[in-house]
Structure formats: structure tokens, C-alpha cells
Image (spheres, rainbow, N blue to C red):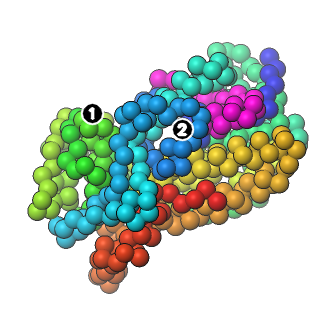
Amino acid sequence: MVLRTQVAIIGAGPAGLMLGALLARHGIDAVILEARSRDYIEHRIRAGVLEQGTVDAMDEVGAGARMHAHGLVHDGAILRFGGQSHRIDFRALTGKGVMIYSQHELVRDLVALRLGAGAPLELEVEDVTLSGLDTAHPEVRFRRAGHDTVLACDFVAGCDGFHGVSRAAIPADQLRIFERDYPFAWLGILANAAPSSHELVYAHHDRGFALLSMRSPEVSRLYLQCTPDEDLARWPDDRIWTELAQRLAADDFTLTPGPITQRSITPMRSFVAEPMRYGTLLLAGDAAHIVPPTGAKGLNLAIADVRLLAEALAAFYAGDPALLDGYSAACLRRVWKVERFSWWMTRLLHRFDDGDFAHRIQRAELDYVTSSAAAATTLAENYVGLPLR
Ligand SMILES: Cc1cc2nc3c(=O)[nH]c(=O)nc-3n(C[C@H](O)[C@H](O)[C@H](O)COP(=O)(O)OP(=O)(O)OC[C@H]3O[C@@H](n4cnc5c(N)ncnc54)[C@H](O)[C@@H]3O)c2cc1C
């Protein structure tokens, strides 16, 4: 079978689904191909902090109703160290806040929008391969329910995450890779427990970093710095709650435990592939870059990429290729600032075993960020989200 569309989108994560929705608003046809099932992508637990730009994009495509009904608007966050809490007031410092709303709920909203509009979303596809990327007539081949299909298109949007096929389809000598691994990971849990704080608590502690976050007024999301090869079997519920209570401890704080419903280990990595375009293939989101989750940026960066990409494709089909020609450079300028912030937040808050001098510098930086309005504003304006351009 041979199908034809304007833009073949590989991956129905936040980047692919949002790109499909934005293109539809410009009257541009797209087919989204996704390797996993609807149930799988709608229950994949990942990020949960949305910048204003991501909230705006959800509203722009008409998928924001549940987010506004159930999301929690946060105007600040707590940095905790030495047993003391220090609030960074995002609203006072920048005029903006963030929205707490789960990534899988955002995916659910975008899937419902797409299927409700009758737009093509091919789920559970196999053996996706890309060809003709250095020509004006690329093709995507895939198998679904035993049938082989060729999807002819003008452009391929590689929105298939870090392990997808899109970036791998670019000849190695056409890509430059920048990366940094960290000597730790995050042990994350979801728990049926009312959040012990109204706002996120980022805790620096001699035993390691901890983060108190939430998904709703009834569900807490918490993380512990752990070793990259940590064995979850060595972490029964009691040990997790005891460790969290130690790292998050402060005079005015009591941690409320509850049944743990999900637990996982998330590796920490910084990664950028340059450029984000090869011929008619355009990369977006985790397919092109990864940030450690400390700055809550991965999902937001993916949405920022596709906002730029949708604008560029709309201009191209209207006769102006300039934005598309500048797509990679425009994204990378922002990507590197977000990489910097995510690296800096990770460096600021985690326990690094790199000596007493480095540890004293880290404590001095925490003190500076929480006692200087200029330093706090720098953190706040990055956390709530830098401008698109
Ligand atoms: C375990 C985990 C926890 C995270 N936690 C946080 C967090 O707390 N805060 C934060 O800010 N960020 C977090 N992130 C990062 C954030 O979730 C990602 O940055 C975000 O999902 C990027 O969206 P994306 O659409 O680019 O990629 P993805 O969400 O990865 O979507 C890619 C899609 O492509 C599909 N796909 C892959 N290969 C193929 C193929 N060959 N053919 C078709 N489809 C394919 C995948 O199934 C997937 O649905 C986390 C990431 C992970 C992995």
C-alpha cells in the first residue's frame, strides 16, 4: 500500500502529537506513526511541570480544557539545604508561574484531539525505515497488522525520542554529538499520598538530592538521587520513605507517606545532536537532545521545538523557506540555553563526590541563589521558561 502526506511524523510523544495538532491548524496534512499502543503512551509516567509556552500551545490547539480543570498553578518552588527552606517566588520575580500537569495526561488530551478530528494516527507500527532523506521525495516504510506500507511525503519529522530511528538515519559524518553522563540516577516513585508541600521542594543533602513533586492533590511524585545501577529490589517502601524523610527534613516539614503505585530508575544525561535537520528530515524533542530532569525541561523543550517547526513548515508551504532553513539554528540557540540551565540545576543540587572544595563552592552557590534577588531571578526566568526565540 502507498500513502501520501505532506509531513510524516515519527513518534506520538508530546513532540509528535503537538506538531500534528499545530500543523492541522495551518491546514497541513500529516500522518503520525507510533510504535506503541494507545494504552501504553497514555500511561507512560514521565514529566509533569509545564512552562507557560507549553500551556499556551495546548490552548492554541484546543486541547487545554482538562489541563486547566485539573492542573495546579505554582507561583514558586522551595530550595532546601542545611535543614532550611528558601522559597523562590517565580511570580514576583518574573510575572509567570508553571502548571503541574502530567505528561501522560497531556498525551491523552492530544491523542483525543487527533482521533476526535479523524486525523491519521497509526499506532503499533513496526519496522519503520526512512529513505530518500537527501531528496525532495522522502519515504517512510512501515508494517502495521502484517501489512507493509510506503508513506510518501515532503518532509519527515523525527519526533521518536532518544532511541528512535530518525536520528540514526542521518549519516554519522553529518552529525556532531555533544554529551555528558552524570555519576548518578533518580529513583522516582508515584504514591497515593497528599503532597506534603504545596510547592515543589528541591533538597540538597549530604546523603544526596531529593525532590518532592506532585501530580494532583492526591498523588505525590518523589525522587531520590541514587547510583546509576541501583537495584530497585533493594528499595522496599519503608527504606524509600525513611530516606526521603531524612533528605527532605526541615523544622517546619513533615513528610506524609502513602502506598507506592509506581517506581523506576531514570538515568541522567545531557545530549545534543547538531544540526537538527538533514535534507528533508527535521528532528525535534528527545530525538535531538536530552536534558537531566532537574530543571523540568525535557517535555517543554520538545514542545518549543515543534512550535518553531510548525511555524517554519507553515511559512514554507506559503512560499517562504527562510524559517525552515533557519530551523536548526533557531532551535539550537534555545536548546543550549536549556541544556546549560538543566546542567547547572543538576550541579547545584546533587551530591557530587568531587572533594570538599567543590562542596563548599556548591553550598556558597545555594546561599547566593537564595539570598540575591539577581541570582534568584536568573533561576526563576529559566525555570518558568525562556522566550521561544
Ligand atoms: C523515564 C523518564 C522520566 C522522565 N521524567 C521527566 C521529568 O520528570 N521531567 C522532565 O522535564 N522530563 C522528564 N523526562 C523527559 C521527558 O519526558 C521527555 O523529554 C519528553 O517525553 C520528550 O518528548 P518527545 O515527544 O520528544 O519524545 P518521547 O516522549 O520519547 O516520544 C517519542 C515517541 O516515539 C515513539 N517511537 C520511538 N521509536 C519509534 C519508531 N521507530 N517508530 C515509531 N514510533 C517510535 C515512542 O514510543 C514515543 O511514543 C523523562 C523521560 C523519561 C524517559
Q: Which residue is mark 1?
A: 261
Classed neighbour count for the residue bearing mark 2: other residues with Cα under 10 Å, few (<14), some (14–19), many (≥20): many
Residue 166 lies, in percent from the top left, at: 69, 43
Boundaries of the magenta span: 18-40
Q: Is residue 160 above or below residue 89?
A: above
The N terminus lies in quadrant: top right
Q: Is residue 88 above or below residue 171?
A: below
Q: Is residue 87 left or right of residue 256?
A: right
Q: Which residue is mark 2?
A: 58
Determine the secondary structure under disc 1. strand
Determine the secondary structure under disc 2. helix
Residue 302 lies, in percent from the top left, at: 57, 47
Classed neighbour count for the residue bearing mark 1: other residues with Cα under 10 Å, few (<14), some (14–19), many (≥20): few
Q: What amino acid is labelled 1 in the image? A: Thr
Q: Between 185 and 86, which is closer to the camera in this rendering?
A: 86
Residue 164 lies, in percent from the top left, at: 62, 41
Instruction: Identify the mark at residue 65; answer none if there is no mark.
Output: none
The C terminus lies in quadrant: bottom right
